[in-house]
Image (cartoon, rainbow, N blue to C red):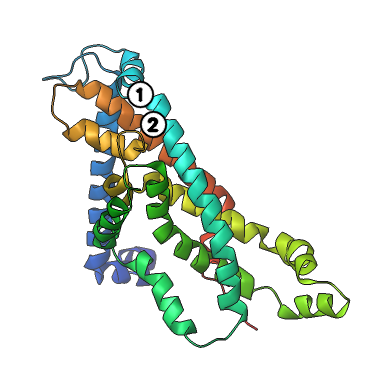
Amino acid sequence: MPDALDASAPGPDRRRLALRPGTWITWGVLAFFLLNLAGVITTVLLDSFGTRWFDSWLPGGWTGHWYSDAWREFSLGRVLGVTLEVTLLVVAISLALGVPAAYALARRDFPGKRALTLLFVLPILVPPIAYGIPLATMLYKVHLAGTLTGVVLANLVPSIPFVVFTMTPFIEQIDPRIEAAARVCGAGTPTVLGRILGPLLVPGMLAAGILVLVRTFGMFELTFLTSGPSSQTLVVTLFSAVNSAGIRSTQSIDAMAVIYTGSMAVLLLIALRFVNPTQLVARSAD
């Protein structure tokens, strides 16, 4: 009997769950969201391989020719080349400009440092469409909009501050006495940067580069506002295919959507493999 009474009596965990209905609501909303997300992805994936799909749970037949049709119809080979070129250029230029700026913010105190930090954080906090329209207007005035150069310049606006705020914690974790000791031993600035700081900054630069790559690959607003027919990335081409006039096969568009989603998934997996999110905000205790 005591065991039966103990078993029927609510324990601490049961009382805690009973007193927190918000927990069940949160999990229910999360499960509903994930279920809908899985349904959308599965529907697009099945349609990209289906011959026809009207009033049944599954397509009436299966084929893979929609991918080859999409590749030819939307010139995906050229589009992927442009996407890769824009992404790599933005990553390289952002690292070349952002790492020295992060070093200055981490190591130096100078007048206007807080104002400069606020200036760097604005493109990250403000929605891209808010500054994308005036930026595109300026690029059109100097005849750079619609070109590859204009797309790269537009994407650099949020990417350089992103590198700065990613690299600053990594630089702050490096003891400045290491640099001082190297200079005392006669090392010049190029030697300190190349042989002392360079190897220590590689993990941070790798993290920043991968995150900028993912961000640029999926950036829609700035690229859409500044790209032309020959400088569209994959995400802009997908949007144009969905909304442009004319009759197009939905299966071909879904095939292109699967290619874009798969590419983003691969990039995100690579980012999570090499980037520890906690390192982006970690600060040295000293």
Q: Position of residue 76 (x, y in %)?
A: 37, 26
Residue 17 in sight from this viewpoint: yes
Q: Position of residue 202 (x, y in %)?
A: 67, 58
Residue 105 against residue 195 in the figure, above or below: below
Q: Residues within 10 Å of mark 1 (few under 14, many from 20)?
A: few
Amino acid type, callout 1:
Ser
Q: In the figure, is residue 160 to the left or right of 130?
A: right
- The secondary element bearing badge 1 is classed as loop
Amino acid type, callout 2:
Val
At 32% from the left and 67% from the top, the residue drawn is 14
Q: Count of labels shown? A: 2
**Which of 284 and 111 lies nearest the eye of the viewer?**
111
Quadrant in which the N terminus appears: bottom left
Q: Position of residue 62 (x, y in %)?
A: 29, 13
Q: In the figure, is residue 206 to the left or right of 243?
A: right
Residue assigned mark 1:
75
Tag 2 and tag 1, C-beta contact below 8 Å: yes
Q: In the figure, is residue 121 to the left or right of 229?
A: right
Residue 12 against residue 153 in the figure, above or below: below
Q: Position of residue 148 (x, y in %)?
A: 40, 42
At 59% from the left and 75% from the top, the residue drawn is 104
**Which of 188 and 208 lies nearest the eye of the viewer?**
188
**Residue furthest toward the right?**
185
Residue assigned mark 2:
79
